[in-house]
Image (cartoon, grey):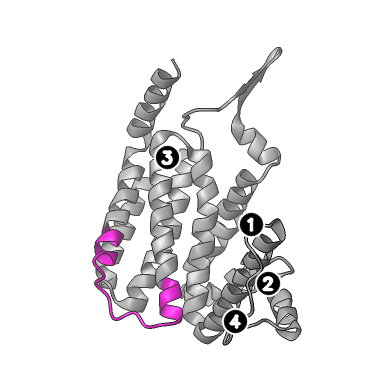
Amino acid sequence: MADATDREVRRVIRDKYGKQIRACSKLLDYAVGELQPWSGRRIKQGADRIIVVEAARGTKTFDAVIHLCKAGYGEQAIMLNRSLFEGMAIAHWVSDNRREAVRLFTRHARYSALLWEETFVALGWVEKPRPRSGRQSVGPKQRTEFRKLFGNHGEKAWVGRNIHTLVKEIEHLWTTEEAREMLWAHYKVPYRHSNQILHSGPTAAGAATAGATEDALHMWIGASEALIPQALLSAYWIYGQQVSLVVDTFRVSSREAFNAIYQGGFKAFE
């Protein structure tokens, strides 16, 4: 019975949100066609690589959001949109702060490797490595620097900023007032919503609850059409910003070709 119900929900989603799903799929196909095989300028070491990695991660996440929405899991898709937004914001910040980005990224990588090693040794999963000639060590002074930048347990973002500060520092890259307002609107509403859906709390509980009667509480544990349009619209906008950065930075396509796909797809969400 559950399988039959899920199939019916997915049919309803195809009928009601097919245009939005196709718009997302068309944007994804365009991006994949430019990224694989690579059609842009040569990728240099450093900041270029971080931006490309974020684009690759965002592409897989966007693809996952589409699959989840088609399957009736809008709640889980919205959870992924948090990661999608953060990756997009970080990529823009890196493009505008290349030297600092590389400095922080390499330090975070070194600190993270150190913390993993210490964790595995403490758990008894590996033996403490013997000192080797030429092995880079992290002294007390550098460990203090790492802790200040990234937290005692490496819990802070490698960019050394919270997401609000990050958006504030990149907003000038959206060159019109309307575009900047859209950036902040996405931060204030869909991104905030994705946080509340991801973490345990009243909003997350409400999203998981299908309804209540006097003697029963009904929960969503399978496919539903809840939050599907919200997840698709948010993901479409965020991923479009990610792809536009790649277009402008690496010239993988003309801006006109990208705009035709991206702006045209927005008609499905009107």
Q: What's the amino acid at mark 1?
A: Trp
Name the residue beneath numbered marker 3: 69
The residues bearing labels 2 and 1 have C-alpha atoms spaced at a distance of 25 Å
Q: Which residues are magenta?
A: 30-51
Rendered location of residue 78, percent (x, y): 52, 46
Q: Does the rendering let one see residue 132?
A: yes
Q: Would you call the spot at circle 2 few (<14 residues within 10 Å), some (14-19), or many (20 or more)?
A: many
Q: What's the amino acid at mark 3?
A: Cys
Name the residue beneath numbered marker 1: 125
In front of the other: label 2 or label 3? Answer: 2
Task: Examine the structure image and report whether residue 66 is included in the region drawn in magenta.
Answer: no
Name the residue beneath numbered marker 4: 132
Mark 2: secondary structure: helix
Report the side of 95 relative to 28 (left or right): right
Q: Residue at x 29, y 60 (%)?
A: 32
Mark 3: secondary structure: helix
- First in residue order: circle 1 vs circle 3: 3
